[in-house]
Amino acid sequence: MAYYAGVDLGATNVRAAVADDEGDVVSVHRANTPNGPTGIAVTEAVLECLREACDAADLDPTQIRAAGIGSIGPLDLAEGAVDNPANLPDTIDRIPLTGPVGQLIDSDSVYLHNDTVAGVIGERFYSDRNPDDMVYLTISSGIGAGVSVDGQVLSGWDGNAGEVGHMVVDPRGRRTCGCGREGHWEAYCSGENIPEYAKLLAEDAGSLDTQLPLDDPDFSAVDVFEAAGEDEFADHVVDQLAHWNALGVTNIAQAYAPLVVYVGGAVALKNEHLVVDPIRERLDDLVFNNVPDVQLTTLGDDVVLKGAIASALTGGTGDRTSSIV
């Protein structure tokens, strides 16, 4: 039997998994993502995680035929590395990945993707409904998408396609994104930005009663969603988030014409009826032509890891009809 590996490299955790040639996971190992001192420390953590997953599967790493990596970005595909990751310390300027992983498993078949591209690859391979035209959208600490059009997964020349969180949804630009630009989708609806957006809304909604701890330094998106249904102002915030999310998905639908949009990420996974359902309900009034089927991902938190495995199995496509490497 042939074996394949997948790696999910995030700003907080790194996970590695070994799977058989049907895509069934044999073993998984998780570790914390190091905060330095340099990117090499992160590379070493990835390699150690992969070694541990192989050991748990009673395999030598050289028995792995191919590996896929779903990673935080931005990516440098030409060098097979992460370049100046935004959510890690500034001392971590470069994280080599494909070369070191290839050396460990003694294979040139190592496929690197940003995490949302890995997500759509995972959906194409593992989901029951997996048309050639589909999107995986994550609404989490940030917002991004992986896109498949006519069966082709869009990576972009530099591996950084799908940064839909930086689409302008609000031309008034009332919120500044973490990237420094104004009016971006992510600046309103990502988990990191929802608290600040709620404070902005509070300035214009003084007549709405609220028990939300807006002035508490620990005020978070969790507080907003937990209060929804019982707090008038929290309901207003959730309604405004639904507005921007629906506009963002409309832009995706008009640009790529997906038949299915799978939604994941912590904000969506933990609040499906407050985040995913309102998007679905509003699209009929917003989309000009094909209204996509919007669903919560069935792969949960494993969507990127499974996408990395599927990439290894299919040569980076996620298409089950592709030749196995």
Image (cartoon, grey):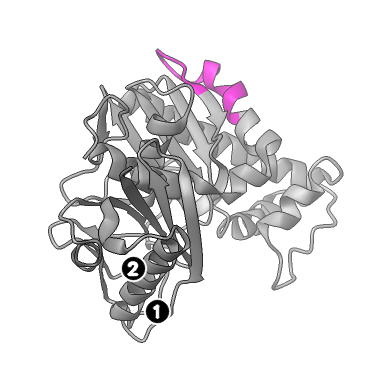
Horizontal side, residue 77 vs residue 44: left or right:
left
Residue 304, position as x, y percentages in the image: 43, 48
Quadrant in which residue 10 is drawn: bottom left
Q: Nearer the viewer, residue 37 or 6?
A: 6
Q: Nearer the viewer, residue 112 or 143?
A: 112
Give the amino acid type for the residue marked by disc 1 in the picture: Pro
Q: CA distance from mark 1 to mark 2?
A: 8 Å
Q: Secondary structure at mark 2?
A: loop
Residue at the spot x=52%, y=36% of the render? 263
Residue at the spot x=57%, y=43% of the render? 300
**Which quarter of the rendered picture does the C terminus lie within?**
top left
| Disc sitting over residue 1 in the figure | none
- Magenta-colored stretch includes residue 281: yes
Discs 1, 2 touching: Cβ within 8 Å: no
Horizontal side, residue 311 vs residue 250: left or right:
left
Instruction: Look at the image and tell me whether residue 167 can be seen.
Output: no
| Disc sitting over residue 85 in the figure | 2
The residue carrying mark 1 is 89
Residue 294, position as x, y percentages in the image: 53, 26
168 to 292, vertically: above or below: below
Q: Secondary structure at mark 1?
A: loop
- Magenta-colored stretch includes residue 285: yes
Residue at the spot x=34%, y=23% of the render? 133
Q: Which residues are magenta?
A: 279-293
Going by the picture, which residue comes out furthest to the bottom?
37
**Which quarter of the rendered picture does the N terminus lie within?**
top left
Quadrant in which residue 194 is drawn: bottom right
